[in-house]
Amino acid sequence: MRERVRAWRPLESIGLDIALAGLLMAVPILIGLASSDGDLLLDALLIAPLVLRRRAPVVSFTTICLLLLVQTVLVDTSRYGDVALLFGLYAIASYGPTWAVWGGLGAGLLGAVVATVDWLVGPNDARTTTVSLVALATVVFASWLLGYLSRTRRAYVAALEDRAAQLERDADQQAQIATAAERARIAREMHDVVAHSLSVMVVQADGALYAARRRPEQAVETLRTISSTGRSSLAEMRKLLGLLRDDGTSGATLAPVPGAADLLELVEQLRASGLTISLDVDGDLQRVDPATGLTTYRIVQEALTNTLRHGGPDVRASVDVHVTGDSVRIRVDDDGRGSTVAADGQGHGIVGMRERIAVHAGKVEAGPRPGGGFRVAAVVPLEVA
């Protein structure tokens, strides 16, 4: 629609200019100002260039000035068609290039001087001549000033439109950035919530399959644990999906997020799945702020989940958490074979760790450790109260 409007505007402007020129040419006929066909022709020649006053303001104004110069040589009196100079001056101040704007003002003032000299110098006294010159110059300047103000207003409106368009583009970019960040955050939460529970369930299911042949009672207990873990994961998924779909009117409640103080419960849950874990905590976990505590919990959870998935049988892991005055230092080691497992390109755990650490301006390292096994080491700065 906007392109159609732009294509129609030139036709609109030239149509209005033709109507203006026609109206100006009809005035002397209607009120009897023209005394002969020659007068009508001269007025028509002066007014005709106004048809191009917006499409070609320099050409239109220059043509009018040349015709007025010819009139000065041939005729010693003013003509009705001289009003074309005022309309042409307005047009060049409003639509012409910058150099022509000031050139048009100079030409108009020069025309006022030439007209005064040609029409009034001689029989009139100096006072009359001066008053006439000032009056003509004032009319010329007023016409030019109106055009210049119109030009300034259009430039101001165009600047506002450009600024509005830029703000709209910036808003779209900010919305895209926010959307991407939110998608990444949701992906991290779903990975940490679901992948951990599913890994525990898979390991326990394998253990139940093995125990079913020799220890049926242990297999039954393991299946109960799998069922409990699955129901817990399903409940967490329902809460997460409910929050994503919540429009603010469903009354969905927010479950408390885990923190550093929940590490013991996490370790006990993984020990129940058969993973041997030693936990060493130095410092008070209760004083860790919620944001840092959640990051600490998720890093330990992801590291131990990877150990459970990739470490192999009889793997042992150690978790060291040291709370200092300005940070939480985490180290998770295992002696499994996870460092030798080829990456399949489907894992997002390490990426999620790095993204979480980046939010706190901390650092994390993950890779094989000396002597075999895998190590995850991270430093999470504490938030300043």
Image (cartoon, rainbow, N blue to C red):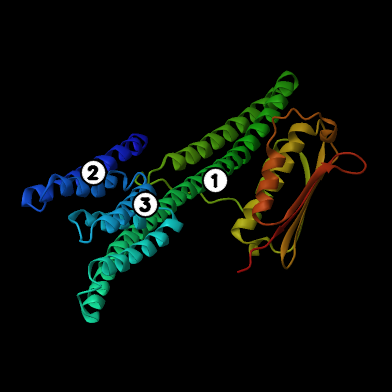
Cα distance between the residues tagged 1 and 2 = 48 Å
Q: Quick one: 166 or 186, which is closer to the camera?
A: 166
Q: Quick one: 178 or 296, which is closer to the camera?
A: 178
Instruction: Provide residue 35's location: percent of width, then percent of height.
Output: 10, 51
Which comes sooner in the sequence, label 1 or label 2? 2
What amino acid type is highlighted by mark number 1?
Ile
Which comes sooner in the sequence, label 3 or label 1? 3
Q: The C terminus appears in which quarter of the rendering?
A: bottom right
Instruction: Report the residue that reaches farthest toward the right.
Output: 371
| Residue assigned mark 1 | 177
Q: Decide: is 281 above or below 315.
A: below
Rendered residue at 23%/43% (across/down): 16
Location of residue 227 (image quadrant): top right
* In contact (CB < 8 Å): disc 1 and disc 2: no
Observer-side mark, 1 or 2, equals 2
| Residue assigned mark 2 | 16
